[in-house]
Amino acid sequence: MIRAMFKRILVPVDASPAASAGLRLAIKLACDQKARLRLVHLGKHIPPARRKNDGMTVQELFEAMRKQGRKLLERQAALCRARGVRADTALYVGLAGQPAKLVLAEARKWRADLIVMGTHGRSGLRRIVMGSDAEKVIHAAPVPVLLTRK
């Protein structure tokens, strides 16, 4: 039996249950393959505490998103370390960011061997209207993509 060797596993993360499922699977694979992870997050959501404030500058908005993204990545990297897995992080902030394009660019730049993603499993009209970042990644990825549902 030939066993695939993945040494660099890219994992897009956010605060969703689907992304958490992807991270759990990636950690298991990293343990098995003695691989390292790269956790990538696109901070494009306005933190709830900031939504109510009037008069926020663009710079303050981006700093709030950056802070929220750093906290998320730190928490998830700590989870990896607790399981003995080395994890690097990459944070991108922007309201107009396209997650699939970001994941693909990061996979190429970091020279990933595998992309592991959680998916929401949308189908039908919701998928057509909202699109599927996972589907976009699958169609253009330079490496294998492993999906898991929440």
Image (cartoon, helix red, strand yellow):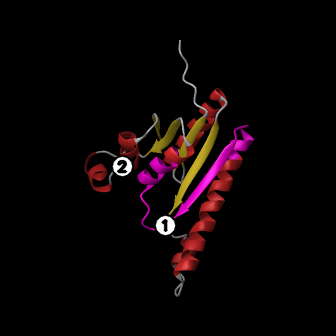
Q: Position of residue 144 (x, y in %)?
A: 46, 33
The answer, for residue 150, to whether it is visible in the render is: no
Question: For mark 1, does the 10 Å Cα neighbourhood hold few (<14), some (14 to 19), or many (20 or more) residues?
Answer: some
Secondary structure type for disc 2: loop
Which residue bears the numbered disc 2?
132
Which residue bears the numbered disc 1?
94
The answer, for residue 68, to whether it is visible in the render is: yes
Q: Is residue 115 rendered magenta in the image?
A: no
Q: CA distance from mark 1 to mark 2?
A: 19 Å
Q: Residue placed at 58% from the left, 58% from the top? A: 91
Q: Residue placed at 69% from the left, 38% from the top? A: 85
To which quarter of the image does residue 63 belong?
bottom right
Left or right side of 125 for 72: right
Q: Extreme top residue here?
A: 1
Q: Which mark is residue 105?
A: none
| Between marks 1 and 2 in the image, the one whose residue lies nearer the viewer | 1
Kind of residue at disc 1: Gly
Q: Residue placed at 63% from the left, 33% from the top? A: 30
Say whether disc 1 or disc 2 marks the residue closer to the N-terminus: 1
148 and 111: which one is in front? 111
133 and 82: which one is in front? 133
Q: Position of residue 52 (x, y in %)?
A: 52, 80
60 and 118: which one is in front? 60
In the rendered view, would you say 40 is above or below 52?
above
- Residue range in magenta is 79-107
Secondary structure type for disc 1: loop
